[in-house]
Amino acid sequence: MKTLVCFGDSLTARHEGKDNPRLTEKISFQLPTFRVVNAGVSANTTKDALRRIEKDVLIHSPDLVTVLFGSNDAAVHKKVALNTYEENLLKITRLIGPDKTILITPPPVDEALQPNRKNTELAKYADAVKRVSEETGSYLIDFYKELYAKPHYKELLVGILKDGLHFGDAGYDILANLINDKIVEIESNEEQKID
């Protein structure tokens, strides 16, 4: 059985009132051949991520790792400078291995409910994720673009907290589907290489 580690902040970690983290539960359902490990910790930035990557991610010898940070790095009260954020993501990707890393851009927020985060800023952090993906040859999911393109995206950001950042089931469905599609694509490309 292959191992997928979901590495991130509260968007990865949240249970939304259920017994298990919503993200890993939905992915496990879609990808029954994977053991899915949740390595999400609320309030984390990429600086925190580097401090715990060994014990929370690498120890599992994962086949694939989703990396979703940036919502806190871009926040006014936790700010990690954009160039530092990009450097941290480069380090994270190299530690995991680009061929095993699925970088995910941080999603937009409902600014009316989020005084500490602005979408113009989050878009810059999303662009940094894309640059790291290009530079390292790692996989990319543009979650920011996928959500922001939906006319009713603010409705998808409604979770238990109703804070415009932590989404509920609708948001997790989108994210889980994007991850599932990406992994299916990766797996079929690998099979073609073998054939």
Image (tube, helix red, strand yellow):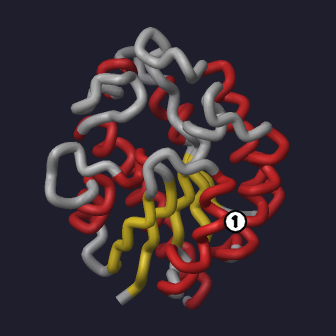
Please state which amino acid type lies under the numbered disc 1: Ile
Furthest-left residue in view? 18
Tally the numbered discs.
Answer: 1
Q: Quadrant of the C terminus?
A: bottom right
Furthest-top residue in view? 112
Furthest-front residue in view? 77
Classify mark 1: helix, strand or loop: helix
Image coordinates of residue 25 in percent, x first then y, are 24, 61
Name the residue at 42% across, 22% down: 150
73 horizontally vs 181: left or right: right
Crowd rating for badge 1 (residues with CA inside 10 Å; few <14, some 14–19, many 20+): many
Image coordinates of residue 49 in percent, x first then y, are 61, 60
60 horizontally vs 52: left or right: left
In the rendered image, is residue 80 in sight? yes
Q: Is residue 28 above or below residue 145?
A: below
Image coordinates of residue 164 in percent, x first then y, are 39, 23
Q: Is residue 50 above or below residue 75?
A: below
63 horizontally vs 78: left or right: left
Name the residue at 65% across, 53% down: 46
Image coordinates of residue 106 in percent, x first then y, are 56, 39
Report the residue marked by disc 1.
92
Q: Quadrant of residue 31?
A: bottom left
Q: Quadrant of the N terminus?
A: bottom left
Name the residue at 29% across, 44% down: 173
| Closest to the observer, 91 or 33 | 91
Q: Is residue 53 above or below residue 14?
A: below
Name the residue at 63% across, 36% down: 78
Q: Quadrant of residue 34?
A: bottom left
In the rendered image, is residue 192 in sight? no
